[in-house]
Image: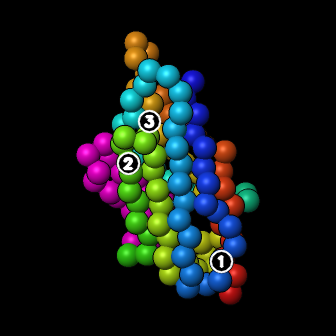
Amino acid sequence: QVQLVESGGGLVQAGGSLRLSCAASGRAFSIRAMGWYRQGPGKQRELVATISTGGRPDYADSVKGRFTISRDNAKNTVYLQMDSLKPEDTTVYFCNAQIDPVGGLLYDSWGQGTQVTVSS
């Protein structure tokens, strides 16, 4: 099973920046789309940004122009650069990857979540 390990969350003032990273590890796999989602208490998990294997990004309207998703396929890593952060961005962020294992079926893998807190 491929594991995703996230890093980079923390506390920042409004208007500040954070960079999240998520690295996939395991054996005999490739990765298709990767993405970031977020989920607040009592709320549904929502899409923040995704990026295709070829590097085409897609963003939620709420983060367009402020967040940038990128990936390093050689490192099996996806990043989320978050600029101009707002208090409403405060929540737990989860990394996602579509895993294509050798000889197996495509499945979704999730990170453990990383807390982002933006103070006003």
User: Who's the residue at 50% across and 81% down the image?
Assistant: 84
User: Who's the residue at 60% across and 44% down the image?
Assistant: 5
Mark 2 neighbour density, 10 Å: few (under 14) some (14–19) many (20 or more): few
Q: Label for residue 72?
A: 2
* Secondary structure category for the residue under label 3: strand
Quadrant of image for the C terminus: bottom right
Q: Which residue is mark 1?
A: 12
Q: Is residue 18 left or right of residue 91?
A: left
Image spot of residue 31 (x, y percent) = 40, 34
Instruction: Please report whichever mark, 3 or 1, sits nearer to the chain's N-terminal start.
Output: 1
**Amino acid carrying mark 3 in the image:** Gln
Nearest to viewer (mark 3 / mark 2): 2
Q: Is residue 79 magenta?
A: no
Residue 56, above or below 3 = below
Q: Give the Cα separation between the discs numbered 3 and 1.
A: 30 Å
**Amino acid carrying mark 1 in the image:** Val
Q: Are marks 3 and 1 in contact (CB under 8 Å)?
A: no
Nearest to viewer (mark 1 / mark 2): 2
Q: Quadrant of residue 115?
A: bottom right
User: Who's the residue at 60% across and 49% down the image?
Assistant: 6
Residues drawn in magenta:
43-64
Residue 24, above or below 60 = above
Q: Give the Cα separation between the discs numbered 1 and 2.
A: 25 Å
User: Who's the residue at 50% across and 70% down the image?
Assistant: 82
Q: Is residue 47 magenta?
A: yes
Instruction: Please report whichever mark, 3 or 2, sits nearer to the chain's N-terminal start.
Output: 2
Quadrant of image for the N terminus: top right
Foreground of the two, 116 or 63 = 116
> Is residue 92 in view?
no
> Is residue 14 in view?
yes
Q: Which residue is mark 3?
A: 98
